[in-house]
């Protein structure tokens, strides 16, 4: 039996997003540095951008944002918008580099994370949220960028697996 590649890719990506959400709300939520927490769903979105380019980065970024918006008390779609834009920009940058050194995915995810956190805070303020009055923005930016950069090799490999267009074929005698 052969499974259609887009269905398999979507299923694997959904599995990664579900695991990231569960880890975010159950494990990561318990730890903070001066009120700042890391963002695993942003990490997944940016890793998809590094692994699959701007289009897949935007799509996975949107899906990751919507997934996270389901459990946040912020306006629905804010994370989806920010993650979608960040995924597209990081994927575009990563795709424009001809020879990618080993550290480039880490730097792309780290810088993209920092930019996404700032964009999220600014967009939240525009929408009437008090995103700049909580934990210091600099602390959040540094924490998210550093941790996401360090985890980027692992999650980029995971997203390469999730985004591959392979199909499973079982042996059947003719």
Image (cartoon, rainbow, N blue to C red):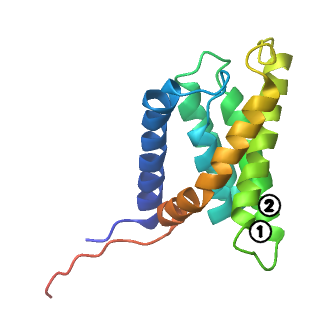
In the rendered view, tell whether residue 71 sits above or below residue 93: above
Where is residue 38, by image quadrant?
Answer: top right
Give the number of callouts.
2
Q: Residue furthest left?
A: 173
In the image: residue 2, left or right of residue 4: left
Q: Position of residue 58 (x, y in %)?
A: 69, 49
Q: Are marks 1 and 2 in contact (CB under 8 Å)?
A: yes
Q: Quadrant of the N terminus?
A: bottom left
In the rendered view, tell whether residue 157 sits above or below residue 86: below
Q: Nearer the viewer, residue 48 or 132?
A: 132
At horizontal 66% and vertical 35% (from top left) the residue drawn is 80
Where is residue 93, by image quadrant?
Answer: bottom right
At horizontal 78% and vertical 80% (from top left) the residue drawn is 99
Q: Nearer the viewer, residue 146 or 65?
A: 146
The disc placed on residue 11 is: none
Q: Position of residue 13 (x, y in %)?
A: 48, 52
Identify residue for label 2.
92
Can residue 83 be seen by looking at this rendering? no
Q: Position of residue 157 (x, y in %)?
A: 53, 65
Q: Secondary structure at mark 1?
A: helix
The disc placed on residue 95 is: 1
Q: Secondary structure at mark 2?
A: helix
Q: Residues within 10 Å of mark 2 (few under 14, many from 20)?
A: some
Q: Residue furthest bottom?
A: 174
């Amino acid at each position: 039996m052969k499974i259609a590649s887009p269905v398999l890719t979507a299923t694997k990506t959904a599995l990664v997003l579900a695991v990231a959400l569960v880890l975010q709300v159950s494990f990561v939520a318990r730890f903070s540095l001066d009120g700042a927490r890391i963002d695993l769903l942003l990490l997944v979105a940016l890793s998809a951008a590094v692994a699959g380019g701007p289009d897949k980065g935007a799509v996975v970024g949107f899906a990751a944002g919507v997934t996270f918006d389901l459990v946040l008390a912020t306006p629905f779609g804010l994370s989806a918008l920010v993650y979608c834009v960040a995924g597209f920009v990081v994927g575009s940058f990563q795709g424009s580099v001809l020879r990618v050194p080993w550290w480039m995915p880490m730097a792309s995810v780290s810088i993209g994370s920092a930019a996404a956190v700032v964009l999220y805070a600014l967009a939240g303020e525009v929408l009437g949220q008090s995103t700049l009055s909580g934990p210091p923005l600099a602390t959040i930016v540094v924490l998210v960028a550093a941790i996401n950069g360090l985890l980027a090799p692992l999650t980029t490999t995971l997203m390469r697996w999730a985004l591959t267009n392979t199909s499973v074929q079982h042996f059947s005698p003719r």
